[in-house]
Image (cartoon, rainbow, N blue to C red):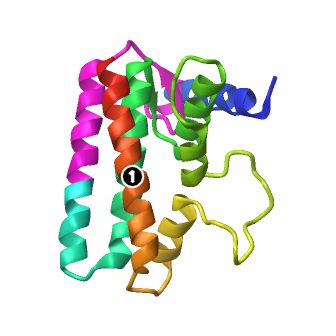
Amino acid sequence: MTMIENKVKWCLNKAERELTENRTHRGLVKIKQDLEKSRAHIKKADHYLKATFHLKRGNFTDLTASTLFYTMYHSLLAIIAKFGYESRNQECTFALIFQLIEDGNLNFDKKLLDKITDLELQEKHTEHSEKTSIEIREEYQYGTEIELKEDVYNELLELTKNILSQAKLIIEQ
């Protein structure tokens, strides 16, 4: 069993255990395929993207790192809902998407996923290597910088638009 398969299994078991203990979970649950939930996640993703543009115009670019990330994340939640899953854990969501790609069930560019998160748990990025969108979001959400560099914003925006566009195509197929 691969590391990703183990992670997905752990996420499913975590949610099952939590649901029996207290009726809420922070893992991954198999549900009935839910296209309406997928569409609701896309609507939320579009909402975050619109918020991004308002924040940019208002010179709150540090906050756009979060809104762009959550646009991408809701896009991925839309995809997994189509495949019959609910996630309340980012790592579980990323692992499931990765597994769906690996298993040939999802036609999604794995390189895009790698730009969001480092699932392979490679060595920490050096100063000159590309940061994932999670790392950028965390840097601006928890750090003291109040201005996201224009080139970083533009790269995140293009990545976000690409992921949202692919998610829309996938859920309507």
The image quadrant that residue 12 belongs to is top right
Along the viewing direction, whichever of 91 and 169 lies nearer the viewer = 169
Residue under label 1, please give it: 160
The image quadrant that residue 3 belongs to is top right
Residue 124 against residue 170 in the figure, above or below: below
Query: What is the crowding at mark 1: few (fewer than 14 residues within 10 Å), some, or many (at least 20)?
Result: many
Q: Is residue 36 magenta?
A: yes
127 relative to 160 in the view: left or right: right
- Screen quadrant of the C terminus: top left
Residue 82 horizontal/vertical position (percent):
38, 21
Image: magenta residue range: 20-48
SS assignment at label 1: helix
56 relative to 111 in the view: left or right: left
The residue drawn where x is 30% and y is 28% is: 38
Residue 19 against residue 59 in the figure, above or below: above
The residue drawn where x is 66% and y is 25% is: 102
Residue 45 horizontal/vertical position (percent):
28, 46
The residue drawn where x is 55% and y is 17% is: 105
Residue 58 horizontal/vertical position (percent):
19, 80
Amino acid type indicated by mark 1: Thr
3 relative to 46 in the view: left or right: right
